[in-house]
Image (cartoon, rainbow, N blue to C red):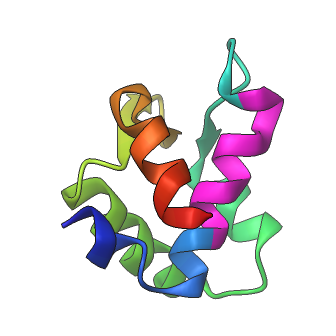
Amino acid sequence: MLANSLAHPVRVALVRYLLNKNCGKGVDNETCNKDLVDLFPYSQSTISQHVKILKEAGVFLTEEKEKYTFYQVNPALVDKIKLFMN
């Protein structure tokens, strides 16, 4: 499931962004759905489809805060993800 979730360049870009954001540590290692749409040159629906796949695979963890959903890379999978992406 992990390999399939990282089989598309958009999903790899989303994961790389969160892995590199503040080195994946601290309070700034997450981002909201709005930021992802603003940061990447893809439509909101495209981002949502790829985020859904990453969530279902357990790559992204989510937290609802007010009207936004925040994402972070699952800390338990960081090492495996890095192996797949290298």
Residue 65 percent location from the top left of the image? 46, 27
Residue 67 percent location from the top left of the image? 48, 40
Secondary structure mostly seen in the magenta stretch: helix
**Farthest-out residue, top:** 26
Left or right relative to 5: residue 15: right
Above or below 4: residue 64: above
- Hey, which quadrant is residue 27 in on the image? top right
Above or below 7: residue 16: above
The boundaries of the magenta stretch are 13-23
Above or below 65: residue 86: below
Instruction: Name the residue rendered at 47%, 37% in the picture.
Output: 78
Residue 13 percent location from the top left of the image? 66, 70
Residue 58 percent location from the top left of the image? 25, 48
Residue 38 is inside the magenta segment = no
**Quadrant location of the C terminus in the rendered image:** bottom right
**Quadrant location of the N terminus in the rendered image:** bottom left
Instruction: Name the residue rendered at 47%, 38% in the picture.
Output: 79
Above or below 7: residue 35: above
> Count of labels shown?
0
Left or right relative to 45: residue 30: right
Left or right relative to 73: residue 33: right
Residue 22 is inside the magenta segment = yes
The front one of 10 and 45 is 10
Instruction: Name the residue rendered at 49%, 41% in the picture.
Output: 71
The front one of 39 and 72 is 72
